[in-house]
Amino acid sequence: MKRDRAFWFAAATLAFLALLPVYAALAAQPFYVTLFSRIMVFALAAVGLNLVLGFGGLVSFGHALYIGVGAYSVGILAHHGITNGWVQLVVALAMVALFAAVIGAVVVRTGGMTFIMITLAFAQMGFFLAVSLKQYGGDDGLTIDARSAMGLFDLANNTVLYYVIFASLLLTLYLFHRFINARFGLALRGIKANERRLAALGYPTFRYKLVAYVISAQVCGLAGFWLANLTKFAAPSYMAWTVSGELIVIAVLGGMSSLFGPVIGALVFLLLEEVLSSWKPGIWPAAETLLGNHWLGLIGLFVFTLALFARQGIFGYLAGKKDSAGGH
Amino acid sequence: MSTSELRPLLEVEGLVKRFGGLLATDHVNLTVNAGEIHAIIGPNGAGKTTLIGQLTGELAQDQGLVRFLGQDVSRAGVAARAHLGLGRSYQITQVCREFTVLENVMLSVQSHLGSSFKFWKPVAEEREVVEPARAALQRVGLAKRADEIVANLAHGEHRQLELAMTLALKPKVLLLDEPMAGMSQVESEEMVSLIATLKSAHGILLVEHDMDAVFKLADRISVLVYGKIIASGTPEAIRHSQEVRDAYLGEEGLVA
């Protein structure tokens, strides 16, 4: 693929992420490592969601469910003394595959508003299922005593965890780059553009959408696996509908038509959240209190402005007019 | 005509479709033979598109049989019939507008090759996909526009692309739904000569309003009025049928 602006922009961002722990160590700000680990976890989930959202045209309003399933797989296994990370990872991905295949077989048959509402409904069912699991903390969530044991990788070390998450983000971007430019990707993008025509050409569109849905859920499950490790915690709130909504906002904000857009979206969204939630602009106190309580409104305003003026998202806007399917 | 040319590819028997009280398809019998162009004409609202929809499987018939290559496909879906070799080009251009011309045809080729569950090799580098796509564009005279975005094509070029996409499926029978609709005189004449070249390789069912084109191209013509075939025969026979004149041709004053 040609090395266009999008490529260099993505490369610069990844280089920044690769060097961040070095800066954090030099600046004696270990908090940055945790913050950016969290950002990458959401970037990973949004990249996963965007396979169906941006390339398949399926607006899933329930992908947080799979973050939750991934996180609870770690939590529940650890609760029963199974702390081997590889076992946890395999179980997490298998559980997500099972959930996604069953739910996908139902939701993928629908489209438009129905699809949005049914994905939301399934995610809410998952949420309340987690709340009802009293032996695993119910409402309060499940504390995980120690991070997963992954042999070579000592996840107890925040920097190691950071780089493992970073590596899984890179791997996912690379795999998706291959998928999207291969026959599967052309078929999937064709379905998004004109499903009826693709069916007439002989494509069993249901199968392609279902496979994309399951792959996309797997990546969110992986994000959940890392999130549980990062926070040493699994809670129903991981699969709250607001999280599903945030994933959509992140993907749209960054740019749905590119693979890399959601990474930018996650960086901007979570950093804004971090900054605005504790912003003290030093104006008069009443306004400061108002901002402190309603900083989400500012994010809303920001997203609104972007939606109006940068239809391709931030990444699409910065990388120039025409998107490339890759960007990696 | 040798007997092999009369081999029926597509056979329709007693096809009925009702929309509420409206009989949109009224016991239609129809065959398309190898190497033949069978045209269907009829006034607006005669049920031509409804009929085609039932042949491709987009609409389920209420009664009757559709046989393709001797096999009963009455209950088969759109994708299954397309894979068997029933190719349809659309009346309203139905292509992916933000894709390039080539990508659209590649989608057809991919479908013809079978599964698209291939996740690794960039499709743009797959000769197996790209070359047949370029060949199909060549056949319809659109090769020069391969890398253009579809939204930028002229109207006539859209129809050419539509046809290239259908041809790339290597269909045994082509269902052409008003391929000349909205075309200029020149474009329309080019399309007529193009369709004439396709006849040797495909059985063709042609639905068309342009009577000049129909009478130039068709080996057989069936006249559909209110969902019912009122006459079927050679262009010569149809031209001179009093019933057809009364029902249709006369009112448009198109009988040469």
Image (cartoon, coloured by chain):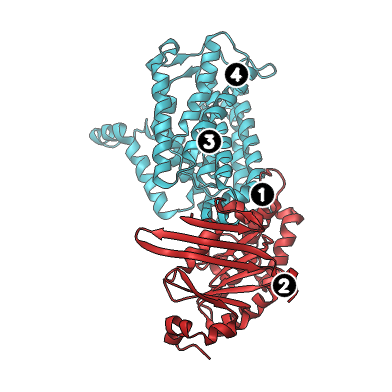
**Alpha-carbon span between mark 2 and mark 3:** 56 Å
The chain letter under disc 3 is A
The chain letter under disc 2 is B
Q: Residues within 10 Å of mark 3 (few under 14, many from 20)?
A: many
Which chain is red in the picture?
Answer: B
Do marks 2 and 3 both belong to one polypeptide chain?
no
Do marks 4 and 1 both belong to one polypeptide chain?
yes
Do marks 1 and 2 both belong to one polypeptide chain?
no
Residue located beneath label 1 in the image: A183
The chain letter under disc 1 is A
* Mark closest to the chain's N terminus, 3 or 1: 3
Q: Position of residue B41 (x, y in %)?
A: 51, 76
Task: Classify residue A160 as left or right of residue A250.
Answer: right
Do marks 2 and 4 both belong to one polypeptide chain?
no
Residue located beneath label 4 in the image: A88
Q: Quadrant of the N terminus of chain B?
A: bottom right
Residue A190 to residue B147: above or below: above
Circle 4 — which element?
Answer: helix
* Mark closest to the chain's N terminus, 4 or 1: 4
Residue B178 to residue B14: above or below: below
Residue B200 numbered mark, or none: 2
Residue B170 to residue A285: above or below: below
Q: Position of residue B163 (x, y in %)?
A: 62, 68
**Alpha-carbon span between mark 2 and mark 4:** 62 Å
**Alpha-carbon span between mark 4 and mark 3:** 21 Å
Which chain is cyan in the picture?
Answer: A
The chain letter under disc 4 is A
- Mark 1 residue type: Arg
Residue A43 numbered mark, or none: 3
